[in-house]
Amino acid sequence: MIEHRLDPLLKPASIALVGVSDRAGSPGQVLARMVLESDYSGEVYLVNPRYSEILGRPCHPYLESLPVSVEHVVIALGNQHLEAALRAIIEHGARAATIYSSGVLDQDTKPRLLERLTAMAKAADIQICGLNGMGFYSVGHDLYAGIFPRAEEIIKGEISYIAQSGSAFTTLCHNGCRLGFNLCVSAGNELTTTVADYMDWSLEQPDTRVIGLFLETVRDPDGFVAALEKANARNIPVVILKIGKSPLGAAMALTHTGAIAGNHAVFQALFKRYGVIEVHDFDEMASILILLQSGREAADGGLAAAFESGGFRELVTDEAYQMGIEFARLEDSTKSIIEQNLDPGLKAENPLDAWGSHYNFEARFETCMNALMQDPNVAAGAFISNYRDGYFLSEAIYRTIEAVSKKTDKPIALATCYSDLANSELCRRAHAAGVPVIDGAHETLLAFRHLFNYRKFKQQQTVDVIHSGLDSDRVRAWKQKLAEHVTDSLGETEALPLFADFGLPVVNHATVSSEADLLVAAAKIAYPLVLKTAQPGIDHKSDSNGVFVNIQSEPELLERYHDLCARLGPIALISQMVDQGTEIALGTVNDAQFGPIILVAAGGILVELLSDKAVAMCPVSAMQAGEMIDSLQTNRLLQGVRGKPAANREALIEAIVNLSAIAYEFSDCIAEIDVNPVLVNQHDALAVDALILRKNSGSPC
């Protein structure tokens, strides 16, 4: 088997523990006990010049006194000793290290200790877990390398969990009995080994079924994207709890797009492109991990749910309606089987209230659940009750689901409507039997919604083809124009022709700098007209009272133009007054790590007032553009309301696709694009205003 570059770190053949201690409760003793009292099969060496023996094992004074060279060295030392310790590790020939300390000294010199350690480690090509972390548990290889007491039992399983926070690391792997892990990592500040590296290693392990991340930042964007691509290729879902979602300062943004996108919008677009399951808290993360660790994939269709309580059924049905989760429509043959096994007064339907009386209820439950799970319209199922240890009804439902689970390959779970339940023993048995137990109606439904959305993503991967190519000669010509442009921004007089050249429809317009030019252009375009300032340096015209609409006559046009000349200057743009329609804002932001994303939002003055937006990585396909439109509340206006005709949806889709292609092809030249509004009516989707911000002003594209 080919060795992975992280094997010496996460499954080394030998390991040395530097700084171990015999003092009860000290980090050094916790580390020693954790490694020595596990089933790790490699050679373990203890190192500390103060001791000759620790926990009945010989202790060596220094690394150079070891009888062999080890693959991995753990440093349980303070910051003041790190530089000498890392130098000794490199000289020893170790290929990996774990370092817990922060790497920050009170009175440091330049370059700082952290910078010195990084330079040493990278020059030696050594993999390091840390600094400023809590170590790792290579559960699948029985190696636990931490300095804080761990849970008495960490269940082996199929989840690789990587956290950029020590507390987040312990939250999942030190608690509960429903999650099974093959790897748990506290990545720290990732001196040389990043989240992307841990993901890549996990994806090479045969027992990995799902990856969970607690993510603050991405230090290796290319490696991170490559890991997401590998996860997709290997059909391994990735679940991410991303923190740091505060938006970019609106005051710093030069376009509406930049103001409303926010830092997290880039990650949302990235996650959507690669099918990442994004969660928002630990309960939601645990719920979907519990469901995914079985490796069972949702079939086609909707959810089947059974209850022993009519009240619980109504509670969950209401919640499902709010979340947009559909229950499967049952075949008549399924209903017939269920009907024969219900007490009088109960109806064969989904969701199903299955409890009537004690008579033979367990056998009837099993028959009904088997029928539900065999129905071709059912994708996954759950029996929802508040389970507690030793309760006859809970035990019976557990036995029912365990038996049904063996007869289907669809996901099926036990779920509750409340979290503070005394059911730890039942949960342990269920986990051992491969039956998920999920706490809370909301978390249960979230988990199944994530499961169904992931199914949809996998299905679309095979049919959704993305084309991004634009005419190469036109691209080169426009890049030359952008490189020669004297200002950082391009207003609509320059941006609209660029859009038109690449298939994005624009309003009929002309740029004027005198009264004579104005009247000639007005005669060609025809009234009613729109007049806007095009004076250089004025990016947001409305803020300067530089826009006049629905101009009906030449006298009115001249009056408005003279006003602009007096206040703002003579350069103006005149355009046709487009038929009324729905205003949509389109824009792109070129992220330094992941490249351009496109944003579709409610347009006009609503762009910064309503949180109605959709984002995606560029370029997008027609299918993706359609899904972005469908996700907007503004879509109801596009469909036509109160007798108004529906807008030209296909024209808007084409505009989104073409703008995304422009942002993608010009990613080396353009930082942001703001097209607000695009006016969408029953005939067209026309860009009527635009702003482009150049990237790396002064540099060739």
Image (cartoon, helix red, strand yellow):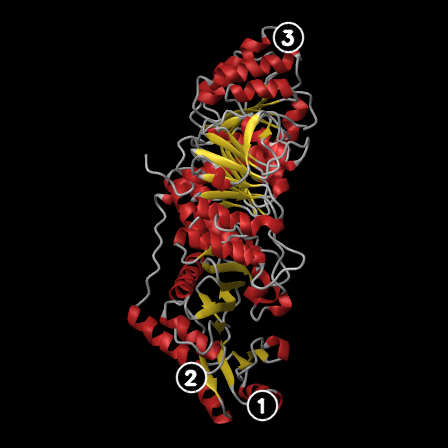
Q: Disc 2 or disc 1, which is closer to the eye?
A: 1
Q: Secondary structure at mark 1?
A: helix
C-alpha separation, residue under disc 3 versus residue under disc 2: 85 Å
Frontmost residue, 670 versus 85: 85
Question: Circle 1: is it few (<14), some (14-19), or many (20+) Cα within 10 Å?
Answer: some
Frontmost residue, 671 versus 163: 163
Q: In the image, what residue occupies the spot 35% across and 59% down?
A: 468
Sequence-earlier tag: 3 or 2? 3
Query: In this figure, which residue is indicated by the disc labeled 1?
Result: 565
Q: Are marks 2 and 1 in contact (CB under 8 Å)?
A: no
Query: In this figure, which residue is indicated by the disc labeled 3?
Result: 358
> Residue 460's x, y, as percent?
39, 43
Name the kind of residue labelled 3 in the image. Answer: His
Q: Is 173 above or below relative to 337? A: below
Q: Quadrant of the C terminus?
A: bottom left
> Residue 119's x, y, as percent?
48, 57
Q: Is 80 above or below relative to 39? A: below
Query: In this figure, which residue is indicated by the disc labeled 2?
Result: 524
Q: Secondary structure at mark 2?
A: helix
Sequence-earlier tag: 2 or 1? 2
Q: Is residue 199 left or right of residue 263?
A: left
C-alpha separation, residue under disc 2 versus residue under disc 1: 22 Å
